[in-house]
Image: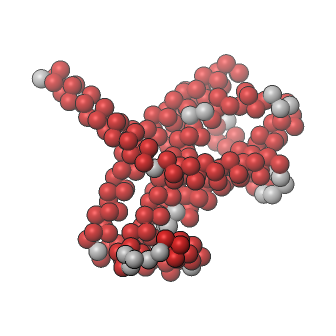
Amino acid sequence: MKKRNQEQKHNFIYRNFKTALIDLKKERGYVGIASIIFIGVAILGFFMPMFFEDKVRELIQELILKTMGLSPLELTQFIIANNMTSSFIAMIMGIFLMIPSIAIIVINGYVIGVVANKSVEVAGITILWRLLPHGIFEIPAILISVGLGIKIGFNIMHNCIRKYNKKMHPLAESVLIVLSLVIFPFAFFFYIFATLIDKQLRKNFSKNLIDALRIFVFIVIPLLIIAGIIEGILIVLVA
């Protein structure tokens, strides 16, 4: 019986992991959008670190204070928990028409750009190669989470628009979506209300959310755990 339960658990994990990979492949466009935003803002932060520099310094100092005195194991646990929380928020806040998800990747990209700039000033350009292992798993996980958030928000708007106007031209739909983001508070309540009162829209939303949660649990979380372990090992080696 125990062996059978273990086999069922293994099959459950494997089946959902495989499904999550297939779903993630379908969402590569949204992850690509998140990646473009991240890279663009990171470059801006690297070459123009003067914007919000004091705020970035405050964020870094606050993080140092939170982690001061922690053992390597405690620091690893802190990194994993903090990254999981941030990534989950980046994904689930896509419900608010994807604006918070985009804001999160913009902030993260700019902070990383500024940190890279200051690191190069102190230790030279080669320091970037030493910083690379710190983000090789963490950054993709965050980008996936943000991409899922963008997809959730976009689909809420897209499905509502198509529900009430199936023949709308894609260009007109794009203009309407942009306008919705401009008048965000009013548009948000309209789209959420429309989704709640319509059975098909609720079904579509539920499916999108379940698919996103599957990807988060079976792909994003493992990536963040690996990233946290690598961070912990590097901290021990450097210390």
Q: Which x, y percent locates residue 64?
A: 70, 40
- Left or right of 144: which side holds 106? right
Q: Is residue 193 visible?
A: no
Which residue sits at x=32%, y=60%? 206
Q: Quadrant of residue 165?
A: bottom left
Q: Quadrant of residue 237?
A: top right
For the C terminus, the image quarter is: top right
For the N terminus, the image quarter is: top left
The one nearer the camera, 174 or 133, is: 174
Which residue sits at x=28%, y=35%? 15
Q: Which x, y percent locates residue 213?
A: 38, 49
Q: With respect to residue 213, does 237 lie above or below?
A: above
The one nearer the camera, 39 or 166, is: 166
Which residue sits at x=64%, y=28%? 133
Q: With respect to residue 63, does 52 lie above or below?
A: below
Which residue sits at x=17%, y=20%? 3
The one nearer the camera, 110 or 41, is: 41
Q: With respect to residue 131, does 237 lie above or below?
A: above
- Left or right of 92: which side holds 205? left
Q: Is residue 22 visible?
A: yes
Q: Which x, y percent locates residue 231?
A: 61, 29
Query: Which residue is farthest left?
Result: 1
Q: Which x, y percent locates residue 235?
A: 66, 25
How is the structure coloured here?
secondary structure
Q: Quadrant of residue 79?
A: top right
